[in-house]
Amino acid sequence: MVGARCEGARCEGARCEGARCARATRLRAALLTAVVISIVSGFSRTAFAQAGDLDPRIVKLVASVSEERLGVILKKLESFETRSSLSSTTSTTRGVGAARQWILDEMKSYSPKLQVSFDSYQVPPQGRITRNVELRNVLALLPGRSPRRIYVSGHYDTVARPGGQGASNAGGPPRDPDTPAAAPADPNAPLDNLAPGVNDDGSGTALAIELARIFSQSGIDFEATLVFMCHVGEEQGLIGARLHAQKAVAEKIPIEAVLNNDIVGNDRGGNGIVDGATIRVYSEGPEDSPSRELARFVQRWGARYVPSHKVRPMARPDRFGRGGDHSAYDQLGFTAVGFRESRENFTRQHDVRDTFEGISLPYLAQNARVNAAAAATLALAPPPPSVLSERNQPLITRAPSGYDANLKWNASPGAAAYRIFWREAWGPDWQHELLVGNVTNVVLPNMQVDDYVFGVAAVDAEGHESFVAAYVTPPRANTPIRSAQDHEH
Ligand SMILES: [Zn+2]
């Protein structure tokens, strides 16, 4: 065994991703490949050397996001005046019925490769759903070679109420901030008040629609199936997303990752602070949950393909007291993150003032590029390897010396290599990485497993990388201890 630690001066205390460091890592990886257990032949190192870190097809895809197209979509969405899930469906120009039909037709026009459909549900009254209503998500599916699915999503429904989110934040009415101000006298009457929702969530909707266009017209043959999803019923309690996620569980639809975008088009805070250069990405914990690993992945690949835009992962499910559709997926066991603009203008949200004037198209386009880079990389990469045994235990031991880090994992279909990541067991970001060959076991001598978090990603022959699967000890069930006193009564 040789030491395989990434301990060069260039790597100390920094994420190990500089070009020089990457070369050093590859040299060490080549050395390590000679000594790791279970070497499998057939892995070509020259493929990586020639590919570099970026795939020119993804560079081109990211560059094809159009501010102009995003603007056209947003103005069209605004023209429906309301897209409330409880609004009228009879008009061809106003309300949720007209809006969903336009979204369907628009995505259908992009490419014959896109399978565009309504994902419909008959929903009886419950919670904030005041009457029987048919809810329709709009979904565009771009089939890949594998059924595993990568989602890019937003919600196209809107809501507006007196005072909007600004009044709620300022301590307004003492009730659930997402409850409508007053129930209509007739619960069966459509909720047709003006609710333009251009940022909430026309922005995420336009982003998903624009990515449906550029992905389906890219000519790239993706490994995973991509789904561009426009959810409905979000403002009534994530209803459209929850119904779809429930269906995915029941039908065993393999959703690998959900990139949900909700309020991502405004760079000007209501307090006057402007930030058009960063985007927040929220994810449910604990700290090495798959959703957190997806957030780290977005940060890593966003920084490479869109270095001018900073991804800020947030180690919490969402903002205080606020929710979004990514949580509907996370709660049912899927891996999901929520994109949120960095500086919100609450006075426009859930308000008639949520209009096109509140949008920064350059900012929305940058957020779309980060989504495109992450979704394309995921959809070209193998799935993340499982690092769990058949008994759901992490495949990490101290063997053979008793003081080593011995990492095993299950082979990922299509992988040509794996990349090991580690960091001190205190702190959010990976500090070190090491590319190894097409193996399913690595020993890092004298690395104390108790001191580091370890993870592994699958990499294909061109360098497309999955998100990381981390080695996490499952929580122990508490077994109450009986004492003698328990029996005295
Ligand atoms: Zn929203």
Image (cartoon, helix red, strand yellow):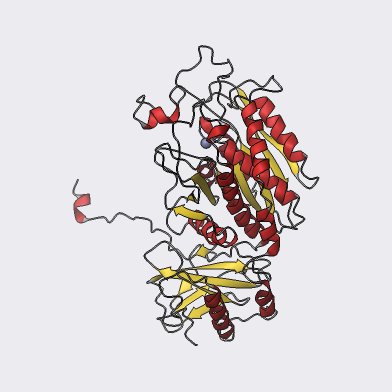
Q: Quadrant of the C terminus?
A: top left
In the image, residue 87 sits, relative to residue 186, either above or below, namely below
Asked whether the viewer can see residue 148, the reply is no
- Rendered residue at 52%/47% (across/down): 339
Q: Is residue 373 left or right of residue 272?
A: right
Q: Position of residue 97 (x, y in %)?
A: 67, 25
Q: Position of residue 296 (x, y in %)?
A: 50, 59
Q: Position of residue 413 (x, y in %)?
A: 67, 66
In the image, residue 165 sits, relative to residue 302, either above or below, namely above
In the image, residue 148 sits, relative to residue 85, either above or below, namely below
> Outermost residue toward the top?
185
Asked whether the viewer can see residue 293, the reply is yes
Q: Is residue 89 left or right of residue 124?
A: right
Tell which of 50 and 41 is nearer to you.
Answer: 50
Tell which of 104 and 479 is nearer to you.
Answer: 104
- Rendered residue at 58%/25% (across/down): 124
* Total numbered badges shown on the rendered structure: 0
Q: Position of residue 419 (x, y in %)?
A: 56, 71
In the image, residue 330 sits, relative to residue 233, either above or below, namely below
